[in-house]
Image (spheres, rainbow, N blue to C red):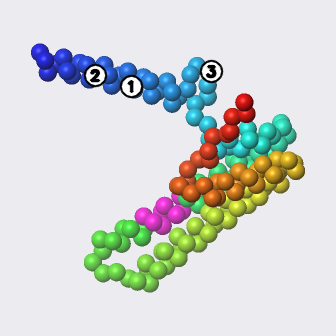
Amino acid sequence: MKKNLLLYILLVFLIVVNGFFLFNYLGRPGAKGPKGPDDFIVKQLKFDESQMDQFKTISDAHRRKMNTISGDIKKQKDVLFSKISTETLNKQEIDSVTSLIGMKQYQLETEVFYNLRAIHELCNDEQKKRFNDIIKNARHGGGNPNQMPPPPAKND
């Protein structure tokens, strides 16, 4: 009986914790869930409607390009790492695949640069100053290069 009671208590605890997590993660009623970098940029730069439309177009095109390039990198890495278990290694083949990965990584970094440049061009002078600060903080903030930008500062 004591073993079952402990299991029931643990089960109730896990259900409550999961409910709490889902409520906070998915958001309260009326909330749209977790926000991404696009929402962060739009809020920080206070884009008007015209800028929002242009930003959405730029962002959608960027996302498609990034997904394509990232998919290509993943495929090439799959090819590369499938060679680990082969009996004999062909150094030329390994060098060729790693060169292809490097070229795709170059395309990825170039796409990020031109996307940020397009957003910068979309901004007015005041927004450009704020955008430059955001980029500077993101570049020098350290941590994971794939992490989302910090949350916006609260203006109390």
Tell me the quarter of the image containing the C terminus.
top right
Magenta range: 71-78
Tell me the quarter of the image containing the N terminus.
top left
- Identify residue type, mark 1: Val
Name the residue nearer the viewer: 131 or 98: 131
- Spatial separation of the CA atoms under disc 3 and disc 2: 29 Å
**In this figure, which residue is indicated by the disc labeled 3?**
30
- Spatial separation of the CA atoms under disc 1 and disc 3: 22 Å
Q: Are marks 3 and 2 in contact (CB under 8 Å)?
A: no
Judged left or right of residue 22, residue 156 is right
**Residue 74 is one of the magenta-drawn residues:** yes
Q: Which of marks 1 and 3 is in front?
A: 1
Q: In which quarter of the image is residue 2?
A: top left
Q: Residue 6, percent across and down?
A: 20, 21
Q: Residue 155, percent across and down?
A: 73, 33
- Residue farthest toward the right in the current orientation of the protein: 125
Residue at image coords 52%, 63%: 73
**In this figure, which residue is indicated by the disc labeled 1?**
17
Q: Is residue 150 above or below residue 3?
A: below
